[in-house]
Amino acid sequence: MPPLSILALHGPNLNMLGHREPGIYGSLSLSEINRLLEEEASKLQASIISMQSNHEGVLVDTIHEALEKHQGILINAGAYTHTSVALRDAIAAVNLPTVEVHLSNIYRREEFRHHSYISPVAIGQISGFGVQSYLLGLQALVHHLREKS
């Protein structure tokens, strides 16, 4: 199997995981989630590069740069999920298989969180399973990429 490289993108406020509303987002820090993603990627014979930014433009630039570096994107766009046409358009532009993930079930939360600009350009979405959403999303993305090749 050829080596796969996956970009894991974390949006705004996810750097506060472990401190931010643990009843909703859990008690793991972002660095702990990234470590678990690295372990899972290794099991799947893939590599994962994680990046977090609170700035929409930085996330857009990183998606653009993924075109030459990665075969797929795992994204938790945080609040930008519900507001950012720019992120949606960047994902569509690079046309890399993308899986959207969320720690909480966005459909059991406030009404404004029920709409995702990312979902229409993603191959799938996993939400509501805490850190497992990330791991399941990574598994699904790698499986999709291996089936495609």
Image (cartoon, rainbow, N blue to C red):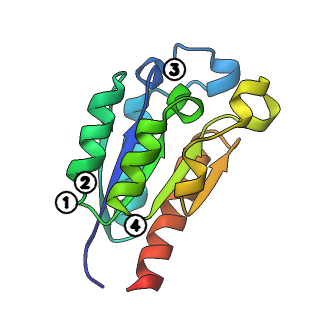
Give the Cα distance between marks 2 and 4.
Answer: 22 Å
The residue wearing badge 2 is 66
Q: Nearer the viewer, residue 108 or 22?
A: 108
Secondary element under disc 4, as helix, strand or loop, is helix
Determine whether label 4 and label 3 are within 8 Å by CB. Answer: no
Give the Cα distance between marks 3 and 2.
Answer: 28 Å
Q: Nearer the viewer, mark 4 or mark 1?
A: 1
Q: Which amino acid, mark 1?
A: Lys
The residue wearing badge 3 is 18
Q: Nearer the viewer, residue 9 or 2?
A: 9
Q: Residue at x 68, y 34 (%)?
A: 104
Determine whether label 4 and label 1 are within 8 Å by CB. Answer: no
The residue wearing badge 1 is 69
Q: Quadrant of the N terminus?
A: bottom left
Q: Residue at x 30, y 29 (%)?
A: 57
Q: Quadrant of the C terminus?
A: bottom left
Give the Cα distance between marks 2 and 1.
Answer: 5 Å
Q: Which amino acid, mark 4?
A: Lys
Secondary element under disc 1, as helix, strand or loop, is loop
From what the image shows, is residue 13 above or below residue 148? above
Give the Cα distance between marks 4 and 1.
Answer: 20 Å
Dot 2 or dot 4, earlier in sequence = 4
Per the rendering, the mark at residue 43 is: 4
Dot 4 or dot 3, earlier in sequence = 3
Q: Which amino acid, mark 2?
A: Ala
Q: Nearer the viewer, mark 3 or mark 2?
A: 2
